[in-house]
Amino acid sequence: MTDRRTLLALLGAGVLPARLTQAQHQMNAAREAPQGYKIQFFTPVEYRVLDRLTEMILPASERSPGASAARVPDFIDLIVANSAAEAQNQWRSGIEAFGGAAFLKMTTEEQVAALDRAALDENAPVSAAGEFFVELKAMTLRGYYTSEIGLRRELGYLGPQVLSSFPGCKA
Amino acid sequence: MIVAGVEYDVIVVGSGAGGATAACVLVNLGLKVVLLEAGRMLTPAKDFMTHDRPWDLKFRGNGKPGEYEGLWKINEYTAHLYTNPRKDQYDSMDQFHWTRLRAVGGRTNTWGRSCYRHGPMDFKTKSMQGFGEDWPIGYEDIAPYYDRVERLVGISGVKDGYFNMPDGVYSAPPHPWRCTEIDLRDKLARIGVPVINGRTAVLSAPYDGRPACHYCGECGVGCDVRARFSTLDVIIPKLRRKPNFTLRTHAVAHQVLVNGEGRASGVSFIDANNDRKDYEVRAKAVVLAASSAETGRILLNSKSRFHPNGLANSSGLVGHYLMDTTKSGAMVGIVPGWRNRKRQNEDGAGGAHVTIPRFNYNRKCNFHGGYFLLFGTGFGRSVNAGVKGWGSALKQEIYSQYGSVLSLRGYGERLPDHKNFFEIDPVRMDQYGIPQLRFRCGHGENEIKMMEDMYGWMEQVMKAMGAEILPYKQQLEPLGDATHECGTARMGTDPKTSVLNPYCQSHDVPNLIVTDGSSFVSLPATHGITTWMMSLSWRASEHLAEGLKKGEIHA
């Protein structure tokens, strides 16, 4: 579907108006509003642990906000809520392996040490926390780099745009 | 059985590349044509999610966890277009990746858009290269039809004069190159690997009332402005203005009917939309172009006392010699020289603007044929998720790598092999009660040797770029994965060793022609088969129209 901004840009690029009238009907179609997301699976404590862990994996920097601002925990909650019971249990026990509520009471140094320990054998994890780290990190990366903050602000992806011609190599 | 009151000159089954081309030629020659399409009409502005960004979709494009896992081409952008093999099942998903898109335009809605001509050597693999089988026709027979097809399709390209890949008719200049593509050309020249302009059915300038590409990069999910060719957007609108053309959607053809002489008299189809009843439509001739697999299925399901093995199958070869491009797994590398590049919009015309054509013509190989290397570069929508560690260092490394990824795949020749085939599944039926296909196919010695050579050269390419190669496994994708299935009603001059004659006409049933990929005798390295298929379809349809007019072809 085509949103209003794209439609205007297409008009600017000389795309046939007849085609656009057709698209116009789709323009106001309601989108899932990410701001209004309601937590479906994790408990408030689990969610806070997740929020902290994902932000540690991809923290805010001068260039861009981190996983928390990119609402990665919401994305993970949506994925886990729609997963099979077995996967759900793994997420629950994974957060537990990091100490659950106790993780939130740790000092920053202790949290860093816990994450370092879990990440130690990333290639072939042996501990429960290690196995969970692999899954948590994969999902954090997926959520972050498919968000507008991750893809546009952090990486600098400039598309998709409506160009009247392709500029080629401008380096 | 409900019989349509109108009798047509020709029934065409399938509105994809081969079928729509046939309908176009026949209608323009004044014949009364009905085009049967199993799927629905598409509305590009609604059905193609061309401008949706990952964050616009509920699951960011991947779908609900597990929903599309193990499937191919199907994701949140395309699930409403493709047939899901978990819903319309067949027993051999591991052996053959069957890609079905039942809608007006078929797979031209989402195709790869490569339009390279196949050359003289590709028609004569046996006599000129010593393997496979020769086509009963040569490049010179097809060249004038390539011209016509290319004018219809509208191709961006330039005459490069590349060996055995004849230059065509180009309606617009090639798409300008990305920085990475220029760098590849310069560095690969040192190891003798050519990088040339792509020839693609995406317009770089307005043509035939269609706008130029606006470079959003998402042609693969369907284009909402007709900048890339599809039969839905280009051929069907031209035909719908003609009084001698009828389009019948939701018509699931399952049998070609025969008359008292064993010739084709009509087609029976099930209305998938309303009543699911069986309908029959009659004509003087039938064109099958439902895709190689579906056409073969219709033929094998059309058994009668005249044709006990299925229609057009006295040779027993329908379904055999199944081919698909030999497609390797990917090799991915990080090119140090491309790290931390200045960001620019590199979405482009969907995929690479340049290509590495077959380059082993003068090299001794331990396998037959050759292959293309296709690659992907640029500031796209994905990152290398394999970076180790966490925190600022991880984030910085991914930032630095973004736009420095080079991915390569080999797309090679497939030798025709009688042992690769499909047949009717003795027990399984689809939701309409139509007997389903099952596939029996795999890779032979030649494909395995070719794969090893592909990986060897992909490594050479990576080395020439100074790339750090990410872990990979040498493998070939199952047949079907390249969506170039063909060869299952091969053409030839001998009715004992071929199904169709050089005009794609059945040896057994003269008023039946097949204009999809079924007629292919070889599947060479040159990438893409669509305009080849359309050229064969154009030629076959002209021949059919002439025969009908002279009375030489009749029901």
Image (spheres, coloured by chain):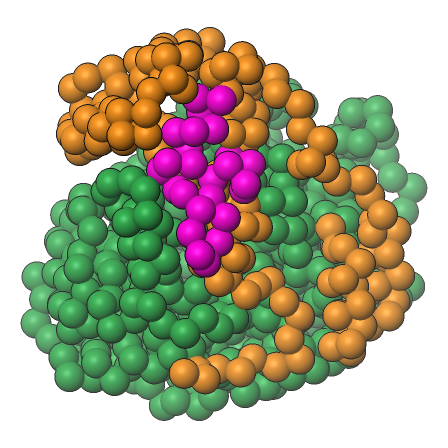
Chain colours: A orange, B green
Whether B188 is drawn above or below B487: the answer is below
* Nearer to the camera, B14 or B409: B409
Q: How many marks?
A: 0
Q: Where's residue B158, x and y in %?
A: 47, 88
Q: Where's residue B274, x and y in %?
A: 84, 28
* Nearer to the camera, A111 or A139: A111
Whether B549 is drawn above or below B174: the answer is above
| Residue drawn at the location 50% of the way across and 37% of the way down | A68
Q: Which range is magenta?
A: A48-72
| Residue drawn at the location 50% of the way across and 48% of the way down | A65
Q: Is residue A154 magenta?
A: no
Q: Which residue in the rendered view is the most extreme toward the front? A: A107
| Residue drawn at the location 32% of the way across and 30% of the way down | A108
Q: Where's residue B227, x and y in %?
A: 66, 70
* Nearer to the camera, B214 or B19: B214
Q: Is residue A58 magenta?
A: yes
Question: Which quadrant would residue B92 be assigned to in this image?
Answer: top left
| Residue drawn at the location 71% of the way across and 60% of the way down | B224
* Nearer to the camera, A14 or B211: A14
Whether residue A171 appears in this view of the structure is yes
Q: Quadrant of the N terminus of chain B?
A: top right
Whether residue B548 appears in this view of the structure is no
Instruction: Describe residue B134's horizontal placement relative to residue A161 as left or right.
Output: left
Q: Where's residue A166, x and y in %?
A: 56, 80
